[in-house]
Image (cartoon, grey):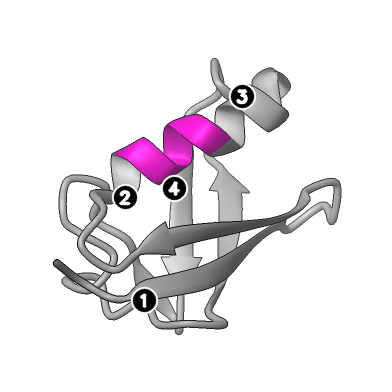
């Protein structure tokens, strides 16, 4: 069933400021897709995400990535 949590996305260039309510059982790639609906200009770039100093595995759940309520997730673009 999981636990409802709220997480915040930001980016190194500080152009992203987006909070979302989700569940710790949600797969990260599904949350990533919601982010791209709000910021479509990042959909076609090669990105990775960091939370608490660790790179996020997008195919694991938020809980499996140790993402908790109030976590800040940083989007970084691979150039």
The range drawn in magenta is: 30-34
Q: Nearer the viewer, residue 5 or 46?
A: 5
Residue at (57, 82) in percent of width and height:
70
* Image side of residue 27 versus residue 34, left or right: left
Q: Given this view, does label 3 or label 4 mark the residue nearer the observer? A: 3
From the top left corner, tell me how far across and down residue 13 is, in percent.
Answer: 82, 52
The residue singled out by tag 3 in the image is: 37
Residue at (27, 47) in percent of width and height:
58
* Image side of residue 39 versus residue 57, left or right: right
Q: Are marks 3 and 4 in contact (CB under 8 Å)?
A: no
Label 3, secondary structure: give it: helix
Q: Report the magenta stretch's main SS.
A: helix
Separation of disc 4 and disc 2 at Cα?
11 Å
User: Is 75 part of what is drawn in magenta?
Assistant: no
Q: Are marks 3 and 2 in contact (CB under 8 Å)?
A: no
Q: Quadrant of the C terminus?
A: top right
Q: Nearer the viewer, residue 78 or 29?
A: 29
Q: Given this view, does label 4 or label 1 mark the residue nearer the observer? A: 1
* Image side of residue 17 versus residue 59, left or right: right
Dot placed on the residue nearer the N-terminal end, 4 or 2: 2
Dot placed on the residue nearer the N-terminal end, 4 or 1: 4
The residue singled out by tag 4 in the image is: 48
From the top left corner, tell me how far across and down residue 16 is, in percent.
Answer: 78, 48
Residue at (45, 30) in percent of width and height:
33
Label 2, secondary structure: give it: helix
The residue singled out by tag 2 in the image is: 28
């Amino acid at each position: 069933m999981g636990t409802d949590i709220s997480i915040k996305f930001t980016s190194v260039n500080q152009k992203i400021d987006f909070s979302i309510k989700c569940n710790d059982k949600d797969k990260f790639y599904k949350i990533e897709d919601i982010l791209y609906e709000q910021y479509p200009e990042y959909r076609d770039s090669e990105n990775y995400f960091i939370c608490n100093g660790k790179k996020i595995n997008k195919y694991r759940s938020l809980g499996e990535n140790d993402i908790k309520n109030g976590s800040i997730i940083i989007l970084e673009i691979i150039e």
